[in-house]
Image: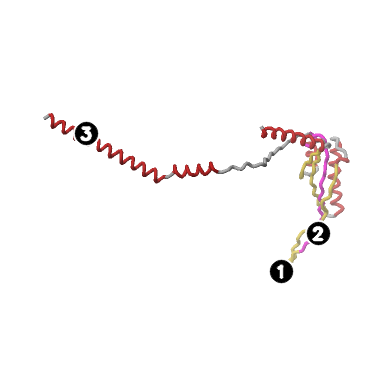
Amino acid sequence: MKHSIYLVLLLCFSFSSAQIKGNATTISRQNVIHAESLGNANAYGNNLNTFRQRNLMPNPVITIDVKALNNIVADSYTAVFNLVQIGETAEATNKLMNKRVNSVKNSLAMQGIVSNDIVIDVISFVPVYETVVEKKLFSKTYTEVPKGFELQQNLHIKFTKVNQFEKILAICAKNEIYNLVKVDYFIKNIEVVYTKLRAEILKTLKEKNNFIMI
């Protein structure tokens, strides 16, 4: 009886050991086949060796970009307004324009802006036409006839204080001048400002060069 039990246990143990070895062999073979199918390790290794064997050529040219900005208060300003005047005749158009400009000059004189600071630039002085339709028995005729004249000018107003600009706008609007073209800024000694900027740029460039050499 004892021999029978021992034989059964021995057979069970042998079967279990064979099953474990069979599983281990199957898993190992699957892993090997899967690894060989990927082939990442070999490909990566070859590329890495090729990359390491390349000779890197350094660039002997280094570009350094330096910018400088300087905020300067302008010595004077010039506001440019555009005026358009239409009249029935050339003389009437010119008179209406002079009336508006003289009104602006008188109001600006009270704000300390003299006539020498106001410049008038004539842009155009052309006739204006309108189309008249003449009806006939079987047709219509469109004819252009003179309607009047159009005078266009630019008004340049120079001022030195920033708070004067709002008053200039109010005076121009009172005289039906609404088209502000631009405002120019002027600095007397602009070359001195450029010289300081160049000095700061060279200083910054030298500092960056020393940093790179380190």
Quadrant of the drawing holding the C terminus: top right
Between 50 and 178, the residue placed more toward the observer is: 50
At label 2, which amino acid type do we have? Pro
Point out the stretch of residues depicted in magenta: 143-165
Q: Are marks 3 and 2 in contact (CB under 8 Å)?
A: no
Any magenta on residue 145? yes
Measured from the top left, where is residue 109 in percent x and y? 86, 37
Asked which secondary structure carries label 3, the reply is helix
At label 3, which amino acid type do we have? Phe
> Marks 3 and 1, Cα distance to the nearest angstrom?
121 Å
Viewed as shown, does residue 70 lie left or right of 10?
right
Q: Mark 3 or mark 2: which is in front?
A: 3
Between 94 and 147, the residue placed more toward the observer is: 94
Q: Which residue is mark 1?
A: 139
Q: Which residue is mark 3?
A: 13
Q: Which residue is mark 2?
A: 146
